[in-house]
Image (cartoon, helix red, strand yellow):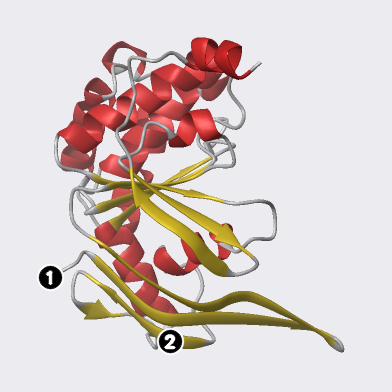
Amino acid sequence: MPLIEARDLTKIYRAGEQTVHALRGVSLEVQAGEFVAIMGASGSGKSTLMNILGCLDQPTTGALRLAGEAVEALSADQLASIRNRRIGFVFQQFNLLPRTTALENVELPMIYAGVKPAERHRRAQAALERVGLGDRAHHTPAELSGGQQQRVAIARALVNSPQLILADEPTGALDTTTSQDIMRLLAELNAQGMTVILVTHEQDIAAWARRSITFRDGHIVEDRPQRPAPSRTLANAAEAGA
């Protein structure tokens, strides 16, 4: 059974008399353990698809199953439950609470899940250690570099043991070297069995994935496997393309 099964997804936005077709009959499957990059220009539909896959939005028409569970017609509370149980999110701007420590930021999803404080602390510390920040647990975001903040965000995404990581432009606010470090971490998590779907407009970032899907005008125009090249540094790739 695919982890994600989408059939004929459409998404229509209406603003006054204007109608925007963000998705036009998109179908795809993602198997557990895949590392997928979704690419496309601004307005191509890739972020709309990410929001639907992440149960942050619902399609206008079409069917979506996540781990065999039909989600396209669920209530807001049911969607929130699926997000908390099955999906970890990583965003471009980290979305950390500025006045709380790294450990407290990582604990947040478990508060919503009703996990007891001692267990929250243990699991948050373990998640920080998993991303190489065990010694930064009591630092606030202002005391961390951009790359460290993104690692905290990844630890937060992992802490409820999700089946799927959705990363929306996770390197967009980072420099080239730090971007490479974050992509190496995501690749390592994928190698350990985590399913990762990445939205990016940067070819060098997408090159870390094992499958590339390209969107244009609400359609999938290319869906192909690829051999990831983590040994090829982003700096070298930039020089090669110069």
The location of residue 132, given as percent across then percent down, is 28, 16
In the rendered view, would you say 113 is above or below 209?
below
Nearer to me, 171 or 115: 171
User: Viewed as shown, does residue 53 lie left or right of 240?
Assistant: left
Quadrant of res 105: top left
Rendered location of residue 191, percent (x, y): 18, 33
Q: Which residue is drawn at 29% across and 23% down?
A: 131
Residue drawn at (55%, 69%) of the image: 219
Residue 21 spot, x, y in % from top left: 67, 78
Q: Mark 1 Cα within 10 Å, few/some/many (few <14, many 20+)? A: few
Tell me what residue is drawn at x 37 percent, y 35 percent.
154
242 left or right, relative to 129 = right
Relative depth, front residue between 86 and 103: 86
Task: From the viewer's side, name the closer residue of 175 and 75.
Answer: 175
Q: Position of residue 13 (x, y in %)?
A: 69, 80
User: What label does residue 1 carry, if any?
Assistant: 1
Q: Mark 2 belongs to which amino acid?
A: Gly
**Local crowd size for mark 2, using a 10 Å CA cut-off: few (<14), some (14–19), many (≥20):** some
The image quadrant where one finds the C terminus is: top right
Q: In this orientation, which residue lies closer to the viewer: 198 or 121?
A: 198
- Disc 2 is placed on an element classified as strand
Q: Which residue is drawn at 24% across and 48% down?
A: 34
Which residue lies under the disc numbered 2? 62
